[in-house]
Image (cartoon, rainbow, N blue to C red):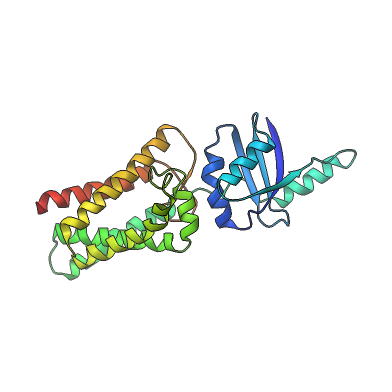
Amino acid sequence: MSERKYRTNLNCGSCVAAVAPTLDGESRIRRWAVDTRSPDKLLTVEGEDIGTGDVEQLVASAGFKVLGEVEPPRGPGEESATAEWVAAVPPASHPTGPRPTYYPIVLLFGLLVLGTGLLEVGSGAFDPTRAMNRFMGGFFLAFAFFKLLDVRAFADAFAGYDVVAGRWRAYGYAYPFIELLLGAAYLAGFLPVVTNAVTLVVMSVGTVGVVRTLLARRKVRCACLGAVFNLPMSYVTLTEDTLMAGMAATALLGLT
């Protein structure tokens, strides 16, 4: 197992999020981290049989550059120099910065359920169809909000596992706006059959990419809340996609 360090132009968290799917998907890399606070934007890569040329290609495929390899220190000062460099690098519990957590998405779902319930109470009676439309409208607007904070970072991360965005990058840029329009359509009651049909297709396609990633046991960052939070791809993501697809299918059956 070898460790190499590289100077890069990964200047910010969004840059790191963009390159994350590529580095996470390389089986020869065991662990990697970027110190965006250092002048050289140091990238450290630990793995088996992974050379400088390989890392350069991986980073370049995400639209960034490796500017050179940092040679390990030599001689009597090696130990102290290495310790100083390691201390400058943030903890690498996860390559893209903050610790992986499901808390934001669980909290968001909880608030959506609470908000939907309160709206139904205020309406005087519980209506399943209306409640489902309100929940789905709130879901899409909330998720679109986080993606729209940094559309490019979302599109780059999304392309790492989505079957359409991986081949057609424009879809990744359009996706937050698709969610935004779906959210508005659900809350406005606009063309329910069309709205639910589009939702069923979009969420089903998303499910395919998530299933493929999980079956391949790839450790990638879920882009469902954009590049704001460090959400690991897991069965939580799969549940999210299948739930929305299932609700859309249920609504279609009731409308046709």
Q: Taking 126 as reference, is 122 above or below it?
A: below
Expressed as whole percent of the image width and height from the top left, the position of residue 62 reads: 55, 48
State the residue at coordinates (19%, 56%): 194
Using the rendered view, name the quadrant where residue 74 is placed. Answer: top right
State the residue at coordinates (54%, 42%): 22
Direction from residue 78 to residue 31 in the image, left or right: left
Q: Is residue 117 among what the camera can see?
A: no
Q: Report the front residue among 240 and 53.
A: 53
State the residue at coordinates (13%, 69%): 124
Q: Taking 158 as reference, is 120 above or below it?
A: below
Q: Report the front residue among 131 and 22.
A: 22
Direction from residue 145 to residue 93 in the image, left or right: right
Q: Taking 96 as reference, is 213 above or below it?
A: above
Q: Is residue 119 among what the camera can see?
A: yes
Expressed as whole percent of the image width and height from the top left, the position of residue 207 reads: 33, 42
Q: Report the front residue among 243 and 204.
A: 204
Expressed as whole percent of the image width and height from the top left, the position of residue 204 reads: 29, 44
Expressed as whole percent of the image width and height from the top left, the position of residue 49 reads: 65, 29
In the image, farthest residue toward the left: 256
Using the rendered view, name the quadrant where residue 38 is placed. Answer: bottom right
In the rendered view of the protein, which quadrant contains the N terminus? top right
Marker count (numbered): 0
